[in-house]
C-alpha cells in the first residue's frame, strides 16, 4: 500500500540564513553542492511542479564526483568547518528531501558504537528492547494537552493511504509516549505487572524549520526508553538513574564532559513533570542538549487511563501508574564532531572510534613491497586478536602522505607506519591523532606482540583521557559566574556560558531569551553551598542556573 505524506511545500519551510553566515560558507556550497539543503537558505513559495523539478535537479546533482577534501578552518567559520568535516570524513550525505540526510557507513559505525554501549547498560538496569509502530493516530496526540501543543508545529501527517483519504490523520512518529501508553493500558492491569521497562531503537520525524546535519534534521535515529511504575518515588529514581547512564556514557565513551541537571519549567518536555538533561559545550561554545530523561508523573497514564489495583490501598482502589521516558539520538554524533574536531578534521575518542588504529605500509621499490605487506598483515592480525579495531590501507593508488592526511581527517586515534627499515629492525612508527606533528610520533616500537599490544592499548587510553581533559579545560574556562543580569548579558555577548543564582519567574526567563538569545540550559545537580541571591530579582535563590546560547 502506498502512503502519501501531505506536508508543507519543501521550498517554503526554511528561514533566511543567519547574518553571521560568512562568504566562506558560500564558497563551501560551491565545493559541496548538496550542503545547501541544510543551509537554511530562504526560498519563495513554489508550485508542486516547481518543487518536483527542484527535487529532480537535486537528485541529478548527486552524481559521483571527485572530492577536494578542503576543510575550512574552525576559527574562520565554525559552521562551514563542521559541514566540511561531515562531507570529507564521509559521515553523512544529503537526501533529495530538504533537511534529510543519509548516514554513511563510517557515520553509522559511530552510532553502532553508541548502541553497543547503551544496550548493555539498558539491559543491566532491567530494560528490554521492543518496537512500536511509526504511524500514530492523531487522536492519541490530542489526548495530552501540553503534548499536542508542544509538538504540533513539528508534526508530519499522513492523510492519504492506498489512494484514499484516511478517516483519521496519522502522525509520523515524533516521539512515542502516546502510542506506548495506548499499549501499556492493555498490558498493565495489576501492580504485579509493574515495573514495565522497555526501550526501542527507532527513527523519528520532526518537521524542523532550520536544520543541521546530525544536530537537527527532519528525520533522525534515537533510542527511547519508556517505563511504568507503581509509585512516584520509583519513577523519580528511574528518571535520575537513566540520566546518570547518559552522563557516564558521555564522560567514559565520548569524552564529552557534560553537565547533568534539571531543566527549567519553560524548557521542560511537553507532558513531563520534570526533565533532566546533559548539556555539552561545543567548540563554538554553544550548548548542545545531548540527552534527556523525563519524569512524566501521571500525565500520560491519566490521559490514557493506565491504572492498576494498588496492593497498598485497603479499599482496593485503582490508581494511575507513574511513568518516565528518556532518549539519546544521532545528534550525539554531531556533539562528538564539534567537541573534539580540529582543522585537520574529525578526532574520535578511541572508545567509540570505528577504527582505532590504521596501518600504512610504505615502500618505494617493487622488491620491498612483499616484505612490508607481510609485516603489515602480521601486525594487523596481532592487534585484531587483542580486540583492537584495526585497518590496513595497502592500496597503491594513493601516496603515503595522502593516506596520512585522509585517516587524520577521519579521526583515527593511532596511525602505524611500516617501511622497509622497520621490517628490518622489527619495529614500527606510531603517531597520535591528538598530538600533531613530530611531537605525536614515536619511532622504534617493537613488533613483538606483547610489547606492541601493550603500547597501543596504553596510548589509546592516554588519548581517551587526553581528549576528556582537554574538553573539561575548555568548558571550565568558558563558564563565567555572574551575580547580576548585566554580568549575564556581558558573558553571553562574549559567547560564554553564564552561571548564576536564579529564582525569577518564567516571564523573566523568557525575557532573558528575548534579549540575549540565551536560555537556561539546566539547574546543575552540583550546586554551590551558601546563601544565594537571584541575579535578576535580588530575591533569595536556592539554586544556580546555567545560561547559554544553544543548538
Image (cartoon, grey):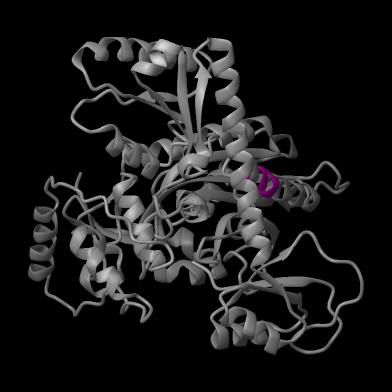
Q: Is residue 535 above or below residue 499?
A: below
Instruction: Name the image quarter holding residue 481.
Output: bottom right
Q: In the rendered structure, which segment of residues is drawn in magenta?
A: 243-249
Residue lying at 60% horizontally and 50% vertically, measured from the top left: 256
Q: Is residue 368 left or right of residue 244?
A: left
In reply to whether residue 150 is colored magenta, the answer given is no
Residue lying at 39% horizontally and 50% vertically, measured from the top left: 344
Q: Position of residue 459 (x, y in %)?
A: 58, 31
Question: What type of secondary structure mainly makes up the magenta span?
Answer: helix
Q: Position of residue 399 (x, y in %)?
A: 24, 33
Res. 535 in view: yes
Number of on-image labels: 0
Name the outermost residue toward the right.
530
Q: Is residue 153 above or below residue 66?
A: below
Q: Is residue 415 above or below residue 491?
A: above
Residue lying at 66% horizontally and 40% vertically, measured from the top left: 189
In reply to whether residue 244 is colored magenta, the answer given is yes
Q: Is residue 460 left or right of residue 46?
A: right
Instruction: Name the image quarter holding residue 405.
Output: top left
Q: Is residue 396 above or below residue 92?
A: above
In the image, 435 versus 145, the foreground residue is 435
In the image, 473 versus 334, the foreground residue is 473
Res. 130 in view: no
Q: Position of residue 46 (x, y in %)?
A: 14, 76
Residue lying at 52% horizontally and 63% vertically, measured from the top left: 143
Amino acid at each position: 500500500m502506498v502512503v502519501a505524506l501531505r506536508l508543507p511545500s519543501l521550498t517554503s519551510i526554511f528561514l533566511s540564513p543567519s547574518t553571521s553566515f560568512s562568504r566562506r560558507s558560500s564558497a563551501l556550497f560551491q565545493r559541496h553542492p548538496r550542503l545547501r539543503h541544510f543551509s537554511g537558505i530562504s526560498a519563495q513559495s513554489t508550485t508542486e511542479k516547481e518543487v518536483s523539478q527542484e527535487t529532480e535537479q537535486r537528485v541529478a546533482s548527486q552524481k559521483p564526483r571527485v572530492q577536494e577534501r578542503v576543510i575550512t578552518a574552525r576559527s574562520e567559520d565554525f559552521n562551514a568547518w563542521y559541514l566540511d568535516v561531515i562531507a570529507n570524513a564521509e559521515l553523512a550525505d544529503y537526501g533529495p528531501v530538504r533537511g534529510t540526510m543519509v548516514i554513511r557507513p563510517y557515520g553509522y559505525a559511530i552510532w553502532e558504537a553508541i548502541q553497543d554501549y547503551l544496550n548493555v547498560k539498558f539491559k543491566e538496569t532491567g530494560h528490554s528492547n521492543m518496537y512500536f509502530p511509526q504511524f500514530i493516530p492523531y487522536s492519541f496526540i490530542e489526548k495530552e494537552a501540553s503534548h499536542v501543543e508542544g509538538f504540533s508545529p513539528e508534526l508530519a501527517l499522513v492523510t492519504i493511504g492506498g489512494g484514499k483519504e484516511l478517516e483519521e490523520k496519522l502522525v509520523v512518529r515524533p516521539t512515542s509516549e502516546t502510542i506506548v501508553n495506548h499499549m501499556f493500558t492493555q498490558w498493565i492491569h495489576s501492580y504485579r505487572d509493574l515495573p514495565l521497562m522497555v526501550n526501542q531503537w527507532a527513527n523519528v520525524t520532526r518537521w524542523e524549520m532550520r536544520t543541521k546535519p546530525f544536530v537537527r534534521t527532519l528525520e533522525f535515529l534515537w533510542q527511547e526508553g519508556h517505563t511504568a511504575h507503581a509509585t512516584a518515588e520509583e519513577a523519580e529514581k528511574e528518571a535520575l538513574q537513566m540520566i546518570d547512564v547518559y552522563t557516564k556514557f558521555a564522560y567514559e565513551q565520548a569524552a564529552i564532559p557534560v553537565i547533568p541537571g534539571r531543566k527549567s519549567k519553560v524548557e521542560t518536555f511537553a507532558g513531563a513533570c520534570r526533565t533532566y538533561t546533559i548539556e555539552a559545550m561545543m567548540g563554538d561554545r554553544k550548548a548542545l542538549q545531548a540527552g534527556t530523561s523525563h519524569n512524566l508523573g501521571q500525565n500520560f497514564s491519566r490521559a490514557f487511563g493506565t491504572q492498576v489495583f494498588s496492593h497498598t490501598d485497603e479499599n482496593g482502589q485503582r490508581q494511575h501508574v507513574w511513568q518516565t521516558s528518556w532518549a539519546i539520538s544521532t545528534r550525539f554524533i554531531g556533539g562528538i564532531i564539534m567537541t573534539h574536531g580540529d582543522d585537520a578534521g574529525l578526532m574520535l575518542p578511541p572508545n567509540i572510534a570505528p577504527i582505532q588504529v590504521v596501518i600504512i605500509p610504505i615502500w618505494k621499490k617493487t622488491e620491498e613491497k612483499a616484505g612490508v605487506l607481510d609485516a603489515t598483515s602480521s601486525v594487523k592480525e596481532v592487534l585484531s586478536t587483542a580486540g583492537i579495531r584495526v585497518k590496513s590501507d595497502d592500496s597503491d593508488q594513493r601516496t603515503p602522505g595522502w593516506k596520512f592526511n585522509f585517516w587524520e581527517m577521519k579521526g583515527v586515534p593511532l596511525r602505524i607506519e611500516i617501511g622497509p627499515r622497520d621490517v628490518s629492525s622489527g619495529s614500527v612508527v606510531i603517531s597520535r591523532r591528538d598530538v600533531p606533528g613530530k611531537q605525536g610520533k614515536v619511532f622504534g616500537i617493537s613488533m613483538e606482540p606483547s610489547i606492541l599490544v601493550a603500547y597501543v592499548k596504553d596510548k589509546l587510553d592516554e588519548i581517551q583521557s587526553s581528549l576528556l581533559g582537554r574538553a573539561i579545560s575548555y568548558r571550565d574556562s568558558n563558564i563565567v559566574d555572574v551575580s547580576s543580569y548585566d554580568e549575564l548579558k556581558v558573558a553571553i555577548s562574549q559567547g560564554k556560558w553564564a552561571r548564576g543564582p536564579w529564582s525569577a519567574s518564567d516571564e523573566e526567563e523568557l525575557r532573558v531569551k528575548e534579549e540575549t538569545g540565551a536560555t537556561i540550559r539546566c539547574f546543575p545537580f552540583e550546586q554551590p553551598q551558601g546563601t544565594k541571591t537571584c541575579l535578576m530579582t535580588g530575591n533569595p535563590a536556592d539554586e544556580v542556573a546555567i545560561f547559554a546560547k544553544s543548538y
